Each structure stands twice: as structure tokens, then as C-alpha cells.
Image (cartoon, helix red, strand yellow):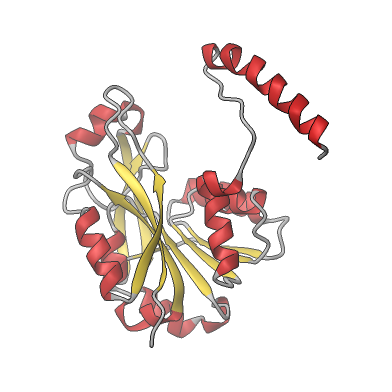
Amino acid sequence: MSGALRALAGRLARRATPLARRAGVEVKRWVPRYDDVGRRVMLLRHHGVDCVWDVGANAGQYGQLLRAAGYDGRIVSFEPLSSAFERLAARAASDPAWSCHPLGFGDVAGRFELHVAANSQSSSLLPMLALHREAAPHAHYIGKETVRIETLDAWCAAHPELLGARTFLKLDAQGYEARILAGGAATMHRWTGLQMEMSLAALYEGESLLPDLLRDAEAHGFRLESLELGFVDPQTGRQLQADGVFFRAPTG
């Protein structure tokens, strides 16, 4: 873009911004390093990631955002909730580098009852606490569904073809992240990077909070390289969750 065009774009954006904000819209130039997903894709490229395991994929929003930001490697998505998995499978169907599997992960394999949330994204194997319900009334539980849970250790051993040369593990399991790590302790060395949703305050009964998850990641040899804004209480502005993006710390 020429200097004149950049200047014109800047003037138009400055004029549009006050009107857009009054309508609840932010208008600004997209700069990848200042955007959570853009920065994440920059890090994936920097670390040579060629495969992303999307655990807790819901309807495929995470994979879709990666694609929109320019990631073109393999995506392997996992989602245990049947209604969300149907939407995930439909979204991934036209992408030959995107596969999906109807299961979740934990520290023990078996069939477990998943609490189904009205917004589906907040569905969890753990009971939801009052703080979460008060901050997001639309996420209340509306039922239960029996789902399949595996361990990362067993699944990696049975399906090594799903791993890339440098694979990134993303966990968004609504309070179950520490248990997924526990079920993958023997294979944690396989991952080049790790992303985890981490709660600053307890939203689900029995979940591990951000300080413990940071220690778990460090114990497995990962270093925090980015923090992404997560769930915020819309009434108070209190941040309740953040996503930590980690990569394996250099050795030697």
C-alpha cells in the first residue's frame, strides 16, 4: 500500500471510529502481533508447528480462526458433545487437512456424563459453580449426555499417524485441563507447544486454577510465551479466564 493510500485509510478510520463505537463496533487496522489469534499463528510459524491438536473443539471455532489468520497445517479436532461435533464435522468436511473425532480426554478412559450447557461451549464434565452462572446466565446447564473419554497417552500410542513432526496441543476443556495433562504425562514430551484455558477464579467444581496450571506446564518443560484474554464478567469487568500459550523451553 502506498503512503497516500495508508494516509487515506487512516483518515477514514479516525472518522469512522466514534460512530462505530457508539454502535458497539471497533474499527481499526488488523495487526497480527496485536491480535490474539494473529500472534498465536505467528508463534506457530516461528516454532515450525505443522499439526495442531484442538482438544475441546466445540463446533470448530478455534480451527476456523486459525485458518482465517493464515495457518495452513494439519488440524486434528476432538469434541465429545454430539450436537457440537455435528457442526464441527460439517465445518471441517471441505478442508482435507482438518480431521475430527467424537471424544474428549481426561485422566481416566471410559464413558462419563457431560453436563450440557445452553451455549454448548461451557459444557463440562465438572459441575458449574455460582460465579460462572452469575457471570454468564446463558451458559447454565440444561441436561446431561454420556460421552467417550480417552487419555492422551493411550490415544497417542494407538494413533501416532495423527501427530505431526512438531505438534501443538490446545486444551479448552472447561476446568478439566489438569486432568488431561495427568492422562498425558508419559507423552507430554511429544508436544512442541501447548495452549490451555486457565481460570483466575473457580468456575467449575474441582478445577485447577491458573497458578497450578502454570506450574504444571513448567514442570513439563514449557515456557509461557503469550497470554490471551478469555472470559470476562460483563457486569464487573473482572477477568475470569485467560489462555496461556506455551512452547517448549530450549535445552542446553
Report the residue at 38% width, 42% height from top: 230
Residue 233 falls in which quadrant of the image?
Answer: top left
Q: State the quadrant of the N terminus.
A: top right
Name the foreground residue: 118 vs 152: 152
Relative placement, left or right, of 130 versus 156 is left
Could you say where residue 236 lies in the image, as x and y percent from the top left? 26, 24
Relative placement, left or right, of 46 versus 180 is right
Could you say where residue 89 lies in the image, as x and y percent from the top left? 60, 54
Name the foreground residue: 58 vs 187: 187
Q: State the quadrant of the C terminus.
A: bottom left
Q: Which residue lies furthest to the front in this view?
A: 3
32 in relation to 178, above or below:
above
Residue 143 in sight? yes
Relative placement, left or right, of 46 versus 10 is left
Could you say where residue 62 lies in the image, as x and y percent from the top left? 53, 51
Relative placement, left or right, of 5 versus 34 is right
Could you say where residue 45 lies in the image, as x and y percent from the top left? 60, 65
